[in-house]
Amino acid sequence: MNIHEYQAKQLLKAYGAPVSDGRIVLRAEEAKTAAGEIDGPIWVVKAQIHAGGRGKGSFKEPEAGPKGGVRICKSVEEAAEETQKMLGRTLVTAQTGEAGKQVNRVYIEDGSDIEKEFYLSLLVDRQTARVSFVVSTEGGMDIEEVAASTPEKILSFSVDPASGLSSFHGRKVAFELGLTGQAFKQCVKLVDNLYRLFIEKDLEMLEINPLILTTDGNVKCLDCKMGFDGNAMYRHQDIMSLRDETEEDPKELAASKFDLNYIALDGEIGCMVNGAGLAMATMDIIKLYGSEPANFLDVGGGATKEKVTEAFKIITSDPQVKGILVNIFGGIMRCDVIAEGVLVAVKEVGLQVPLVVRLEGTNVELGKKIINESGLAVIAADNLADAAEKIVKAVKG
Ligand code: ADP
Ligand code: MG
């Protein structure tokens, strides 16, 4: 789960990390009051979307909008104007994809005098199974370019969970960034606070880009991205309340409401499968037969008819789906329940694309009977390979 920059900064502040004063604006008429509450003389207006690269992003036509999703302003009036221009518009950045994201919230922040921009992030490194730090003096808007062309400018190390973080880690980061004096001490403390936040709130990723050194020698977090471990959110109601559902894929959102494990993908064959392993195998075999899956979907072991119906609706709501493959092994799950769910869903949403059903396991005969007697144009399959071959053929012709 991701949150907005302004929310992440509130968390940083609560953990003692230095951030700028700022106000969030949801409605255009609030912009001037919000900007007026910030000292100046520079105001920075920042579009809040769950994607980076806003500074270099651009707004979609028709009207000419601000140049990019981060605007430096010299007066309260200008800040209010830029805010009003951003609200409701669609911002396209390197991370949003072509469709872009609608800006529903704008953050107005006190401007900082920047001496240097650094990069600092923490993430769960699956290879070492530890929390890793990634540090670079080359922070700002081109970190991807730095990683690609001058990887030697990036320092990375992991923290042993048994011994935990110690001040030597903080000193390592501060040395790498070439800090001295009070900024050095601030950096050591920052590293400690960030690690504590990361562990206590079950983060997956925390990125500060840029972390800056101000012209008066202080360290500050100027941008922040946080990603949380969705499976741990049940124990962080405070974080859950920061969820912005308008930022999520509507299909994934609907799936999460019904406790379905669903991830939208780019392909053309919608899959409804029970069990994560079988779902992965199904996706693999679709690729093997020359097509691409439109989603990962595990309806789970004990899915009800309602859940199956919902899953089917989510799959068919995707305009990219050119065919559907239902692949169920009935262990705990019964094949007749699946068959009924599919029928209910098809009656509700109609079936515009070919459907291949492969059922195996508990009550398989009953399941097949329900499907065969339904009068639907369903293609029956006997095994995994047969099912994949049939659906790819039906889609590709
Ligand atoms: P993004 O990474 O989405 O482009 P950032 O928040 O990193 O957005 O902003 C882009 C750039 O804008 C920063 O690298 C920094 O140079 C400048 N910037 C952002 N916030 C401020 C601020 N409060 N004061 C001065 N400059 C800022
Ligand atoms: Mg940034």
Image (tube, helix red, strand yellow):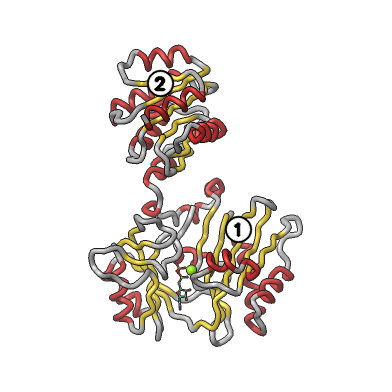
Task: Tell me if mark 2 has few (under 14), some (14-19) or many (20+) residues whose alpha carbon lies within 10 angstroms of its own.
Answer: many
Residue in the image at 55% along x and 46% along y: 231
Distance CA(mark 2)–CA(mark 1): 42 Å
Give the labeled residue for mark 1: 123
Q: Position of residue 262 (x, y in %)?
A: 46, 40
Dot 2 or dot 1: first in sequence order is: 1
Quadrant for residue 315, please give it: top left
The answer as to whether callout 2 falls within 8 Å of ligand 1 is no
Give the quarter of the figure containing the C terminus.
top left
Front in this rendered view, residue 304 or 288: 288
Residue type at mark 1 is Leu
In the image, residue 360 above or below residue 54: above
Task: Tell me if mark 1 has few (under 14), some (14-19) or many (20+) residues whose alpha carbon lies within 10 angstroms of its own.
Answer: some
Circle 2 sits in a helix, a strand or a loop, which is it?
helix
Q: Which numbered circle lies on residue 339? A: 2
Answer whether residue 24 is visible to the viewer in this image: no
Residue furthest right as drawn: 163
Q: Position of residue 293 (x, y in %)?
A: 45, 37
Residue in the image at 46% along x and 58% along y: 3
The answer as to whether callout 1 falls within 8 Å of ligand 2 is no
Residue in the image at 53% along x and 54% along y: 228
Q: Which numbered circle lies on residue 371? A: none
Left or right placement of residue 59 versus residue 388 in this view:
left
In the image, residue 347 above or below residue 131: above
Circle 1 sits in a helix, a strand or a loop, which is it?
strand
Q: Position of residue 354 (x, y in %)?
A: 35, 27
Residue type at mark 2 is Ala
Q: Position of residue 357 (x, y in %)?
A: 42, 23
